[in-house]
Image: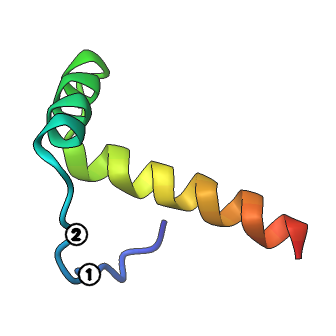
Amino acid sequence: MSGDRTTLPPVRVDAELKERLRRYAASQERDVSWVIRKAVEEYLDRHEQEE
């Protein structure tokens, strides 16, 4: 990832998903934002390959 970072609009999730993200991030010793970035990147990679 390049040094050009920016923020996106807030994403609303329910409390259960937020807690799942928090638990998973903690288990991986990562920030929740890192988990979200990786998930979005993997999602886009997978779907862009289908095009």
Q: Which residue is mark 1?
A: 8
Q: Which residue is mark 2?
A: 11
**Residue 16 drawn at (x, y percent):** 18, 35
Q: Is residue 30 left or right of residue 41?
A: left
Q: Quadrant of residue 24?
A: top left
Query: Vertical placement of 43 versus 34: above or below?
Result: below
SS of the residue at dot 2? Answer: loop
SS of the residue at dot 1? Answer: loop
Query: Vertical placement of 22 versus 48: above or below?
Result: above
Q: Are marks 2 and 1 in contact (CB under 8 Å)?
A: yes
Q: Amino acid at mark 1?
A: Leu
> Residue 29, labelled with which disc?
none
Q: Nearer the viewer, residue 4 or 46?
A: 46
Tag 2: Cα neighbours inside 10 Å, few (<14), some, or many (≥20)? few
Q: Quadrant of residue 29?
A: top left
Q: Nearer the viewer, residue 11 or 16?
A: 16
